[in-house]
Amino acid sequence: MRIVEAFHRAARALRAIVDRLGRTVTWMMAAGLPMVATCQKADTAIPIPVAQPAPRPVAVIRPAPPPPETPIGSFQVTMYFIAAEEEIDGPRPANGNVRVTADTADTADTADGPDDQDDGDATLAAVANVGPVPDLVPMFNKSCEPLVHVSRKFAAQARLQGTGRLRDGRLINVAGKCACAAMCFHIPPKPREWGTGGSGKALVPFRMVAVDPRIIPMGSLLYLPELDGVRMPGRAPHGGFVHDGCVVAADTGGGIKGKQLDLFVGRKAYVNALARRGGSHAWLHHVAVWNGAARCSERRGKVSRSAAGSI
C-alpha cells in the first residue's frame, strides 16, 4: 500500500510539472520567444555578431548660393569725367601757354638794341593776332613744387573731377591736401587711359562709380535699373553699347556724401549726351540701387551681367 501511495504521489507531482511546463511553453510561443536554448562550455568562446552601423552618405560640398538681390535704396546719381585741357581752354595759342607781360615786351625791346623801338610792339601785336592767352596758375605737388601752369578754368575743373588731361596727353591726378594749396596733384609715370580710382583700379567709362564708403563698401557690385537698356554715348570699346545696369564701386570723392553715386563717363561731352527729353538729367535724381552680386560680375576690370536675376 505504501508503495502504491508513493507512486500516486510521484505521478501527481509529475503531472503538475508537465502542466506547468506546458503553460510556460504556451506563454513563450505567444510572446515570440525562442524555445530552444543554446548551451556552451565555460571555456569555449562563441563569437557573437555585432550589428554594424549603416554607412553614412558622402556629403557633397556645394558652393554657397549668391546673396539675394536686395534693394539698397534710392540714390542721387551725378556724373564726372576727365577734365581735358584742350576741351576746356580750346586749341593751344601759337605762342603756347606763355603769358605776355610788360616785362616780356621790355625784354624783346632790348634784345636787338636800344634803337629798335618797334620790336616790343611787334611782339605784342603778334600775340594779339592769335587771341588772348588766359592767366595761368600753378598746380602743386605734395612737396609744394609747381607741376604745371594751367588756366584757372582748367585747374578748377581738375580739382572738381579729380583728374585732368594736359594738352601733351599726360594725366594729372589729385594727391590730397597739402600745405601750399587746398588740393595737390601728381602726374603718374605710367598713366592709364582714363586714370585710376580711389580703389587703385583703372577707371572705365560707364562701369565705375564713386561712392561714400560708409554707405557702400569699395568693390561692391551694384545694379542700376535706370541704366539697363540705355545706349551709352561714344564709340567702342568704351561707348556705343547698350548698358546692362551693372557697375562697381571703384572710387571715392570728397563731395560724395550719403546716398549719392558719381558715375564716371570719361568725357565732358558724354554728360550732355546722357540727358533726356529737353536736355534734362532729372531721371538721375532718384535712382534705385540694388545689390548686384547675384546679377553682375567683374573679371579683369571688366564689369558685365552674369545672370538674368529676378528684379
Image (cartoon, grey):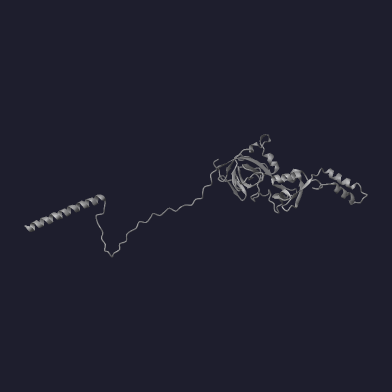
**Residue lying farthest bottom?**
43
Using the rendered view, name the quadrant where residue 1 is placed: bottom left
Residue at the outermost right position:
115
The answer to whether residue 5 is left or right of residue 250 is left
- Which residue reaches farthest front? 179
Give me the residue at 78% from left, 46% from top.
136
Q: How many marks?
A: 0
> Outermost residue toward the left?
1
Q: Quadrant of the C terminus?
A: top right
Q: Which residue is drawn at the image coordinates 9% and 56% (left, top)?
A: 5
- Taking the image as shown, residue 18 lies to the left or right of residue 286, namely left
What is the x, y in percent for residue 209? Answer: 64, 45
Q: Where in the figure is residue 17, as x and y percent of width and height?
A: 17, 54
Q: Is residue 124 left or right of residue 90?
A: right
Q: Residue 144: x and y, percent?
A: 74, 52
Between residue 32 and residue 308, name the one nearer to us.
32
Q: Residue at the spot x=85%, y=48% of the render?
A: 103
Is the residue 262 above or below the residue 111 in the image? above
5 vs 63, left or right, is left
40 or 14: nearer the eye? 14
Residue 257: x and y in percent read: 64, 43
